[in-house]
Image (spheres, coloured by chain):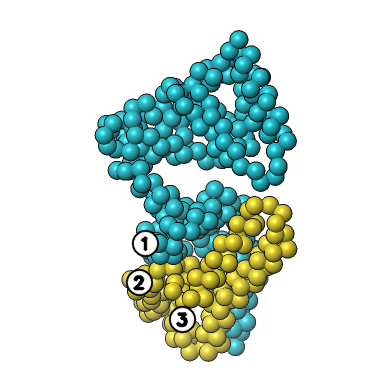
Amino acid sequence: MVFRDISTQLIEVADYVYNMQPGQRNAMILSGESLNIIYLNKGLLELMLSSTDDMEVVIGCRVSPKQKGDIVALMRLRHSNKVTLAIGDGANDCSMISKAHVGVGIAGREGMQAARSSDFAIGKFKFLHKLLFLHGREAYRRNGELILFMFYKNVLYVMVQFMFGYYSVFSGQTMYEKWIYQIYNVTFTGLHNIWYALFDFEFEKEVFMNTPIFYSIGMQNTVFNMKEFWIWVFYACAQALLILMVCFYSAEDT
Amino acid sequence: MNCVLLANILILKMQHAYTGINMMIIAAQILCFFFLLWYFSIELQTDVIYRFMDEFTSSKTAWLGCFFVVTSLWTIDTMLHAIRLSLAYLFAGKNETKSDFLKQQEIKMSLHSTSMYS
């Protein structure tokens, strides 16, 4: 009887979602009991997941700690290219926190278990805003840009030598002195990366907190992706060619 | 030298918080190169670099070349940014990512135009 009720309801939801207007926002509430039955049947599970894909928010109520973890694992499996975040303050959230990509634990009244099993521990729920919109966003941007910069500076350095091979008939003649090779990454271009990774903020803190659209760079992965990588490599190659030309033609009369 | 200059000036350009300390670090790294070049040009007498510093600093075309290479950071960057913005405007509304990118660009431009963060 219960099974039939749930399947009927899910079919109704799927039908509703199918006929939904574009831009319409909906929410879905699932109870722990229903989830128990849905998990036992593959067809119902698929029906539920296809319906929840178009929902703005899905709320699970009266769910067990294991079910919380299972929901996160299911989402990771279904949307493998998405990043999941779980936040909780009690021991019943540990499973969910450890299964998500990013686990945030709140240390406080319900003990330290959640904070201990999390990646990031905060003191109050309200700090999540700052953690995500300011520190999370900026950490992603700085890390992404620095990785690309590392590729850039090394491609720039090596491509000049590679292109120089055309002038030296690939005889193995080096363009730089050996000491430059050895200390280029450590002494000439190493220290400011640390500074950049620690202290650079794109805007003032209030701007990040009040402008949520800036947070979307992490969700859409716009800073560090394949396209950006090749743009930076192209950038380095173009400048390496320029350096080679300038070095050759400017030193012609000396 | 151009590689060192470019890498350092590019990261200076990437930064948003010009506190002075970061600029000093970058200046120290660039000057470190010149110091080592000078030192090795008088020390390594058997190497090809011997007396290279004098020759290099006396060449005006070499310095002009350096200036040209460094300014290319702004020209290439501006060209790429213009192409990217044009493409984003061209395909605006096709999907959410590009419209978000445009919205962010517009907010950034408005913030920079008030010269609060530039």
Comes first in the chain, label 3 or label 2: 2
**Mark 1 vs mark 3: in front:** 1
Q: Residue at x 53, y 71 (%)?
A: B110
Disc 3 target residue: B52
Q: Chain of mark 1?
A: A
Q: Which mark is residue B19?
A: 2
Q: CA distance from mark 1 to mark 3?
A: 38 Å
Q: Chain of mark 3?
A: B
Residue A132 in percent (x, y) is at 43, 49
Chain letter for the yellow colouring in the rendering: B
Up-down relation of residue B105 to residue B70 (above or below): above
| Mark 3 closeness class: few <14, some 14–19, many ≥20 residues within 10 Å | some
Confirm whether circles 3 and 2 share one chain: yes
Q: Which mark is residue B88?
A: none
Which residue occupies the foreground of this view, A71 or A35?
A: A35
Q: Residue at x 41, y 74 (%)?
A: B30
Q: Is residue A190 left or right of residue B111?
A: left
Residue A166 in percent (x, y) is at 67, 67
Q: Is residue A16 visible from the viewing direction of this image?
A: yes
Q: Is residue B37 left or right of residue A44?
A: left
